[in-house]
Image (tube, helix red, strand yellow):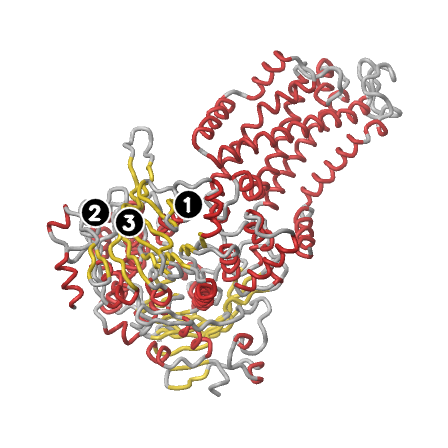
Amino acid sequence: MAVLLQATGLKKHFPLKRGLFGKSQVVHAVDGVDFEVAEGETLGLVGESGSGKSTIGQMVVRLLQPTSGTILYRGRDIAHLSPAEALEFTREVQIVFQDPYSSLNPHKTVGQTLARPFRIHGAARNGAEIQARILDVLRDVGLNEAFIGRYPHEMSGGERQRVCIARAIALRPKLVVADEAVSSLDVSIRAQLLNLLKDLQRKYSLAYLFITHDLATLRSVAHRVAVLYLGKLMEIGTTEDVIRRPSHPYTRALLASVPIPDPVAARKRTASELGGSIPSPVEPPPGCRFHTRCPEARDVCRTDEPALRAFGAQRAACIPDVVERLRAE
Amino acid sequence: MLLKVEDLRTHYKLPDGRAVRSVDGVSLDVAAGEIVAIVGESGCGKSTTALSILRLIRPPGHIASGRVVFNGVDLIGLPEERMRDIRGKDIGMVFQNPVTYLNPVERVGDQIAEAAILHLGLGRKEARAKVIEMLGQVRIPAPERVAQSYPHELSGGMNQRVLIAIAMICRPSLVILDEPTTALDVTIQREIINLIRDLKARLGVSMIFITHDFGLVAELADRVYIMYAGCVVEHGSVFDVFREPLHPYTQALLGAVLSINEYKETLVSIEGSVPDLKAPPSGCRFQSRCPRAMPKCAEAPLLKEHRQGHAAACWLYP
Amino acid sequence: MEAVVARARAVAGLFLGDAATRLAFGYLALVVAVAIFASWIAEFPPLQTSVGPAFARPGVPYFMGTDDLGRDIFSGVVHGARVSLGVGFVAATASAFIGVVMGVVAGYFGGRIDVALMRVTEVFFVIPMVFLAILLVAFFGSGIWNVIFVIVILSWPATARLVRGQVLSLKEREFIKAARALGEGHAFIMFREILPNTLAPIIVNGSIQMAQAIVVEAGLSFLGLGDQNLTSWGVMLFRSQRFLMQEAWWTFVFPGLALFLTVLALNVLADSLNNILNPRTRHRKA
């Protein structure tokens, strides 16, 4: 499969102002991350708060500019696009956010919201054609013409999120960033929307960058998974590999933390915990970011940052013999 | 039985005079030393049920009828002063966003001590010792230092432990936890899950655990009540309900739940939406979305024990 | 369409729901009508002297009395409504327009534009408004347009700050990010996505500013800095200063009352607009 998007050495630092006399500090939101997304595939970005996963998503859709590093879309560096190219880019790469309540303008009807993509990109010749396209895209997301005149407050959370998805796929993009797109929804609604996202992927060979904190969701959605911690990539590989043979102590801890919806299995396993709390991304620990909480940490981890190395089909940023031991277990 | 809720009804008055029947005839039991989970989707009335037990319903809401018998006393009829004594002393509470329940300008040690001074009549010194002990119980490292901290100096997980310490300091026999881990990261959530298990084992406290997450139910609960549109549709031991869910709603919910251990190609989803609680349909509340609805469903089914301790409100089990 | 009608009806219900709002609204409607039809309602031109005897007591035919030069007070109050409301409306509208544009641009783009705007508005905030108004009018001269100009110069920064604050929080909302990701232009985002969401506070602020403008105009006139060729309530108050100690109470009570009630009604209106426009239809949690 052809590579659609490739991020290399991606960094995003946010300056932090600390009063008149405080020294200026920097939030290391994303601190050197590499990954790629192939056409039609779903790459899951998983991490806890402070991992930088949402920041990556916003850089991919050009809402934020990387501090350094590059993002290539079909081989083109998206940091240097002419206005016309930038407009074309928005046609191909779209985003869906977490909160369906703040993702829609409260003063606009669904019809007004969904007309915009076609207007901006001149994708329809006249009002009638726009109406027809709106209807098409509403049907694509499981809604109907009755929704055209509705305001956001007249819809449920699930319906709003369908409208957000409709807006994102209106121009048949190649890549959609789903930033916790189903996380705030109830179980049954979440299931509906995940089915919808999968259907759309099959129908339009969409690629997703699926950002979430929830590994259980990724299991059924993502082809590959990238595990982030404090702005760094800990591990990346196919979903099956990462879940069956976690090769990084953090991935392991994360997997052990996820509740299992099966009382028998949940009570059988030894629920180890990490201890400590996630350090601040303002002063991330030196060496390996994870060493302050890592059960495998050694002296070298406090000073040297491990590189991302290949182990089988996976890549993990950890000491090779630790990884080999974890993989053997 | 430590707590027995009988036919509880809590309504919210709308400006137009109609009432939203948020809790519409809920009955539940909590035995000493058990964790009971109340599960359901948003709007099902699970949190309102918890608040009603504590009589914390504010206008325009009110408890329309029902009994909440705690240790043999019906809480619904108690004067407010007696109720205030029970809250915090005999029944503890833990909520979802710890930070909003802590005073930002008061040291957490003092906030924990407050309950002990108020309810147990302890002096400053005794209360201090008790606070340090309690912080140890909720497994906070360096309790002396943490007691001196302000909420903003602690992480979300730490603040949640502080809230649990406040709820537990008077050694209540029942603690109500409303989505206590929803705002926390996965690895922190794991610590709180382990802590809750540990507190139950060591202190033998009973808990009502409100959640929308079946993973947490499986991890923590002894028994579970499934709520839909203001009513309990099924209850039973957590093993029975997960192994053999009776009600079509429970079956669908469990089909929609995702697990890290299993790849699901297509997820079970429930079409349609929750009925309007201002004018709920007569008969079974789930009938319009139920794949197995039948004419009989126009009549409201009662909760019936299908097996020992496992009941469902559905005509499939007459 | 039905939704719009239902919404309009709901707003109307809220709007006329409480007695104070109803009174304020009714009074303002009356004043506006009087201002528009002043020439038909007033019997005499407001500046015409000797339409009656000097200091005629209220009664028939001068039911608000006359002043020292025999001008009809009622005709003055009626025409004064036109000037006072006109000044208030024009000044508030112009100030809202400038304030909104500056506030939206500063809030949306941030950076240096924002810093510059904030410094400018701070300057206006530390200098007492009336003092500056006096200085400026004394400098430019006291024609009515100068008075309006000065009021606008002094009042747009408040609106700009208000709007900027709103924009700062709105631009972080996800629907704005979605619009940017969709390739929407800056102008569209500022004025078609963000602006409609700030209209409620702008309207509320506008009615308060209108009240303020009327007071400032009256204040300037009372100090003798108003346009003497026009009859505003303030100008009438200025003229009747000298009779304050005399028996001719009607020369200042009627214009004063008109002014007071108008300002009060505008404030009441702002208050209820705030109540009507602010609470969004929130969804109750379980």
Residue B171 placement (x, y as % from top left): 28, 63
Q: Secondary structure at mark 1?
A: loop
Q: Which residue is mark 2?
A: B145
Residue depicted at x 73% and y 25%: C83
Q: Are marks 1 and 2 on the same chain?
A: no
Residue A252 placement (x, y as % from top left): 23, 62
The amino acid beneath tag 2 is Arg
Question: In 3D space, how far apart are the residues under numbered discs 1 and 3 (Cα atoms)?
Answer: 16 Å
> Which labelled disc corresponds to residue C25?
none
Residue C55 placement (x, y as % from top left): 82, 16
Question: Image quadrant of residue A274?
Answer: bottom left
Q: Secondary structure at mark 2?
A: helix
Residue C238 placement (x, y as % from top left): 70, 16
The number of numbered discs placed on residues in the rendered structure image is 3
Question: In 3D space, how far apart are the residues under numbered discs 1 and 2 (Cα atoms)?
Answer: 44 Å
The amino acid beneath tag 3 is Val
